[in-house]
Image (cartoon, helix red, strand yellow):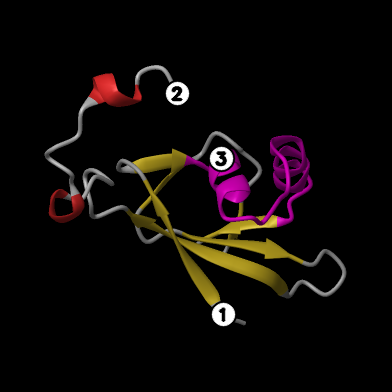
Amino acid sequence: MHTEDVAIRGDSIKLGQFVKLANLAATGGEAKELIASGMVQVNGEVEVRRGRTLTEGDLVALMDPTTGSALASSRVSTDTDDDYFDEATADDDFDPEKWRNL
């Protein structure tokens, strides 16, 4: 099974938010149910607290309750760029008045 690295903004994220961000669950409600039912492991340990704080390097896995094998897993990685704005592609001649009434 392949482990996906999922970038987060900032230094930490809550488990429930990360499960949804990593597409291990379609909705926040589904993430809450998966965590409460014990189907989510963090670093190899079952975790039932959706408010658990995750930091860079933590491994989150969605487990199959019947076989105990991992269905999917994602690793927390921090976003190394402080800003998505790229100076090299910036248009310094941008005129906001020109686009104001669009």
Q: In terms of secondary structure, what is the magenta stretch mainly?
A: helix
**Residue at disc 3, secondary structure:** helix
Mark 2–mark 3 CB contact (< 8 Å): no
Q: Is residue 70 above or below residue 16?
A: below
The residue labelled by disc 3 is 17
Q: CA distance from mark 1 to mark 2?
A: 45 Å
The residue labelled by disc 1 is 2
Judge from the rendering whether residue 47 lies leftward or rightward of residue 69; answer left or right.
left
Q: Is residue 65 above or below residue 56?
A: below
Where in the figure is residue 41, as x and y percent of width and height?
61, 58
Task: Determine the residue positioned at 23% across, 51% down.
Answer: 81
Q: Is residue 3 above or below residue 41?
A: below
* Residue 18 magenta-highlighted: yes
The residue labelled by disc 2 is 102
Please give the range of residues in magenta: 14-39
Task: Determine the residue positioned at 35% across, 43% down.
Answer: 9
